[in-house]
Amino acid sequence: MFEAKYTDVVDALRFDIRNGRFGGRNVRLPSFRELAKEYNVSLVTISKAMNFLQQENVVDIQGTRGAFIKADVSARPRSNDIAVIHNFIGDWEGLHAIEALESYAREKNMGVLSLKAAESIQYLPELLTKLNADGFIFMHSSLTEDTALALSHAHIPFVSFNRLDLDCVSWVDYDNTGSLAETLDFLLASGYRRIAHIDFKVDFGSFQSELRRIYREKLEAAGCFDERLFIARDTRHDMRRQYGQPFLEAASRKAVGYLLELPELPEVIIVRSFSGEVLLDEFARRGIDLEKHSQLLFTLEDIQDYPERFPALLFPYREKVRAGFDLLYKFIRTGNCGPERIILQPVRKFRTYQLIIS
């Protein structure tokens, strides 16, 4: 109990000092007795906390003269708000993500500002460095290199929910490549050879190129690679722009058309992002019972709907949001902006299934 209280005081003092609550560098802090009263702890606890901060070079304790601020102090006013930057256009996954962040922020008496990156992407670095927020979370690959460098140079904490290959970027992400490799190993060991992978086309970052690389390497090693079976033709953005809110259903129907262009249906279809029920219904509408021809395996966030009779890799959505918020909150409290990286593992739902080659 004592240790937890002591560490809480260290975090609170560090945060208040670095955010200018007591003034700038070289300013004398209130006495230990006044600080103990302010933070509602004993004189022993405040002394221990201040000695710890002296070891971190945050304060300089000069005997009877008192303690002085030694660390650089942010010129940014503290707002008790974080901002989430995203490219959501009314889709329910985005709404769930922001609601979860708001819930976690309330636990820390903080608020959440929501900003859409696509509306001001060319002005985003300047806009964010001037925005009165204590830190930023970037979703759906909304973080660009220019924005990351601008925030890093301004010593403003931020966390990305997708990987960006810059030394200054802290991120939280799923083990997409590792889980795909494990899934392909499992399917190949089960005897499958015609394995399709279907997803939206992704124009940014290296996410999809890495998935394609893993897919090609695994299937080439097994002597069964067919480039036509890695299908990624339409972007989410283009489908939203063309079809509006029901874009996912429209994209799933288009995916059926792409699969039917193949000389024969694959033995396994790894479905990423699309609606499983719409896929099955669209095949049925065209007079095809898909389950008689192909095994479906879903890779998606665990809040998304899919036909649960099929195997799946479920990515822990709330765990990702929680991990990202906790990492940002730590940066805000400590003044340390990382970088740190967190890789989350999926929940595997296919090991319990008996996959049978038709």
Image: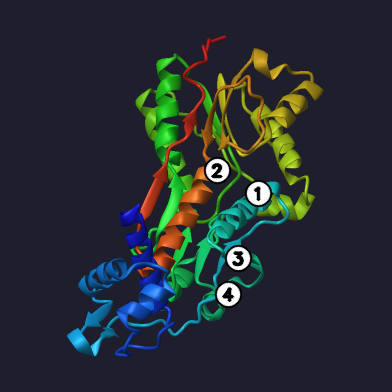
Is residue 245 shown left or right of residue 337?
right
Residues at marks 1 and 4 touching, judged by CB atoms closer than 8 Å:
no
**For the residue marked with disc 3, what is the amino acid?**
Gly
Q: Which mark is residue 268?
A: none
Q: Check the picture and name the quadrant holding the C terminus.
A: top right
Q: Nearer the viewer, mark 2 or mark 3?
A: 3
Q: Which mark is residue 122?
A: 4
Residue 285 drawn above or below residue 14: above
Q: If you read the primary sequence from the N terminus, does the residue marked by circle 2 or circle 1 appear first?
A: 1
Q: Residues within 10 Å of mark 3 (few under 14, many from 20)?
A: some
**What element does badge 2 sit on?**
helix
Q: Quadrant of residue 217?
A: top left
Does residue 209 show up?
A: yes
Q: Nearer the viewer, mark 4 or mark 3?
A: 3
The Cα–Cα distance between marks 1 and 4, rounded to whole angstroms, is 27 Å
The Cα–Cα distance between marks 2 and 1, rounded to whole angstroms, is 10 Å
Q: Nearer the viewer, mark 1 or mark 4?
A: 1
Is residue 39 shown left or right of residue 120?
left
Residue 316 drawn above or below residue 238: above
